[in-house]
Image (cartoon, grey):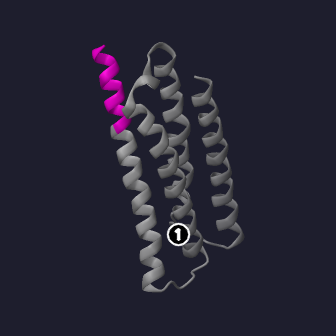
Amino acid sequence: MKKYLNLAYIYAIAALVAGVFYREFTKWNGFTGVTALGKVHTHLFMLGMFLFLIVALFAQNNDLESQKSFRLFLKVHNIGLPLTTIMMVVRGITEVLDIPLSKGLNASISGLAGIGHILLAISLISFLTALKKIAKS
């Protein structure tokens, strides 16, 4: 359980840093529009901190770690969420600074963010599968 609380703590700190970065970076650059940076904060809070708090609660009274789908969830989720948020930060910085991107670079940023989202979808399905299996026990 402590491992999951530590992950929740790490993601909470990352979410807070992302929120401060978004606020200050856009303010320093005089940017008032909508940017991907504004969504990084909530992604890290919801898919990071809150999700691992829920995991900790389930792991406390259940044998969640014995489930193969749960172990898959842990690995894939902790790759997918950082990948997604890093690419959202990259996209947001290019939006705020109005950096012109080639078609290839633009597609690469979108593609990597898309891969991160696919990994998150796989991890969430794996987590729900593990919960379903322990509920049958």
Q: Is residue 70 left or right of residue 44?
A: left
Front in this rendered view, residue 58 or 99: 58
By secondary structure, the bulk of the magenta-drawn segment is best described as helix
Residue 68: x and y, percent? 38, 31
Q: Amino acid at mark 1?
A: Arg
Front in this rendered view, residue 12 or 78: 78
Which residue does the image show at 35% across and 46% down from the upper left? Answer: 122
Residue range of the region highlighted in magenta in the rendering: 126-137
For the view shown, which residue lies furthest in the left direction? 136
Residue 32 in sight here: no
Which residue does the image show at 52% across and 45% down from the upper left? Answer: 78
Q: Quadrant of the C terminus?
A: top left
Corner quadrant of residue 10:
top right
Residue 57 in sight here: yes
Whether residue 137 is situated above or below residue 29 in the rendered picture: above
Which residue does the image show at 68% across and 73% down from the upper left? Answer: 29
Q: Residue under label 1, please give it.
A: 91
Whether residue 30 is situated above or below residue 117 in the rendered picture: below
Residue 33: x and y, percent? 53, 69
Whether residue 136 is situated above or below residue 91 in the rendered picture: above
Residue 62: x and y, percent? 44, 15
Q: Is residue 33 left or right of residue 30?
A: left
Residue 45: x and y, percent? 55, 42
Residue 38 among magenta residues: no
**Crowdedness near tag 1: few (<14), some (14–19) or many (≥20) residues, C-alpha within 10 Å:** some
Which residue does the image show at 34% across and 19% down from the upper left? Answer: 134
